[in-house]
Image (cartoon, rainbow, N blue to C red):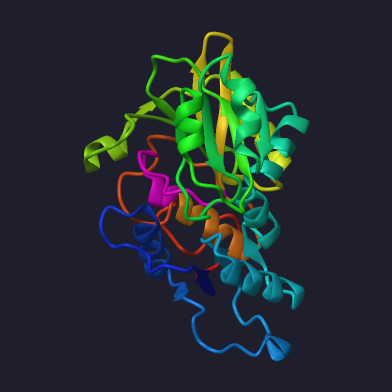
Amino acid sequence: MRIVVLTSQPVPRTASVTADCLDLLRSWGARVDVVLPETLVDVTSLAPDADLYLLKSVNDHVVSLAHALAAGGGRCVNTADVARLCRDRVAATASLAAHSVPVPQTWTTRDLPALEELLQDGPLVLKPGRVGAGTGSRVVWDVEELLDLSPTEQPWLVQRLQETSARDRKLYRIGEQVFGVKRRWPATSLLEKQGEPFTVTEELHRITDRVGAALGTDLFGVDVVETTTGPVVVDVHHFPGFKGVPDGALRLADYIFAAAAGSEPEVLQDDSHQNNSHPNHSHQNHSGRGRA
């Protein structure tokens, strides 16, 4: 079995769920290669030669390469279409709303002065319309702050600032499993980045069902804000870091191993991972598949 990770950045080795996941896959007998497509690639003769491709980046070059591999029959975890949708915050928010996912009131514009009227009703959160556009998100409280912003060719995603006293909540979906992590923002230490797990309610689980339908995948992360009227989703991530998920590396590795083998991932219980072995402690008969 060969699994290829497509990414624009090397996988970090420190405190990385992804790196630990890849190490587990290798220990289970899979060949795992991390490919940074910086070299010359002949796309006219590109042919998939791996059992599974793992698309980790929303970089345009990497996503285009994943699309080319898929066109040749390659199978990819989180397809190019999913990555493109998640990178486009405007399209992603519209898709979430269309699938009855609770989101803040949202606008989009390139004309910042057009937001002056909206500021009369309270502060706004401005996010670049595309993830990785080189401009960070910011909160704008008044017209003076708005006029201080530099014009940009990129569209803005504009949302009403949500009033909440709770810590940021992140939901991670791995197959049918959903995990919740409370996290301080901004996180200034590794411990704060790990956050604190919390019990996912039926309402939050249903929200991830709708997010999955909107994105077309069951592997993703969402940022949730708890408001006085209920939870709202303020951002989506096509391949998050999964920090704070109990046994996150093992759960993720099982999902990817099953996808590479063409079978359904085994549902892993919270107390089922006491070591780094394969979930049934054997590579010979897991979900009907043999050792790679």
Report x, y in % for residue 15: 27, 52
The residue sitting at 40% across, 70% down in the picture is 26
Residue that appears at 51% across and 55% down: 132
For the question of whether residue 179 can be seen, the reply is no
Query: What range is drawn magenta here?
Result: 238-251
- Residue located 59% across and 28% down the image: 159
User: Considering only vertical position in the picture, is 230 above or below 60?
Assistant: above
Q: Position of residue 169 (x, y in %)?
A: 44, 28
Along the line of sight, which residue is nearer the eye, 278 or 148? 148
Q: Is residue 135 above or below residue 53?
A: above
Q: Choose top left, top right, bottom left or bottom right for residue 115.
A: top right
Magenta residue check for 277: no
Secondary structure of the magenta portion, mostly?
Answer: loop
Q: Position of residue 253 (x, y in %)?
A: 46, 56
Q: Is residue 70 visible?
A: yes
Residue at left offset 50%, top offset 69%: 5
Toward the viewer: 3 or 237? 237
- Residue situated furthest top in the rendering: 228
